[in-house]
Amino acid sequence: MTFNVKAEALRLKNEKKLISKKRFKPSKLDKHKQRLLALYEEDTCIANLQRWLLRKGMRVHWTTVKRWVQKNA
């Protein structure tokens, strides 16, 4: 029995499509979207946005804020 690389790679890609699902849950940062974007447009750094969220009672890591801003700004 020979190993068919192309067929195996295609099978793995198809399996990945079945396994991986898109995230349907909205981000908890979305409820502060307008204010976060307004602060970011005023050149507020990501760490300060994180501190602002902490004052609002939302504890998130700065990389979460960074990824959210990159996606939504």
Image: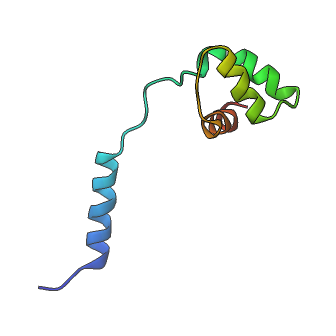
Image quadrant occupied by the N terminus: bottom left
Depicted 12 relative to depicted 71: above or below: below
Residue drawn at x 67%, y 38% as measured from the top left: 66
What residue lies at 43% left-to-right and 27% top-to-bottom? 24
Residue in the foreground of this view, choosing between 19 and 60: 60
- Where residue 60 sits, quadrant-wise, is top right
Q: Position of residue 12 (x, y in %)?
A: 29, 62
- Residue 33 image-quadrant placement: top right
Residue 9 in the image: x percent, y percent? 32, 69
Query: Relative to 69, is 5 on the left or the right?
Result: left
Tell me if residue 26 comes above or below residue 6 in the rendering. above
Residue 37 lies in quadrant? top right
- Which residue is pictured at 69% across the width and 16% down the height? 55
| Residue appearing at x 36%, y 39% in the figure | 21
Name, please, the residue furthest toward the right.
42
Q: Nearer the viewer, residue 23 or 47?
A: 47
| Residue 49 % position (x, y) | 74, 27
Front one among 68 and 13 = 68
Going by the image, does 5 lie left or right of 44? Answer: left
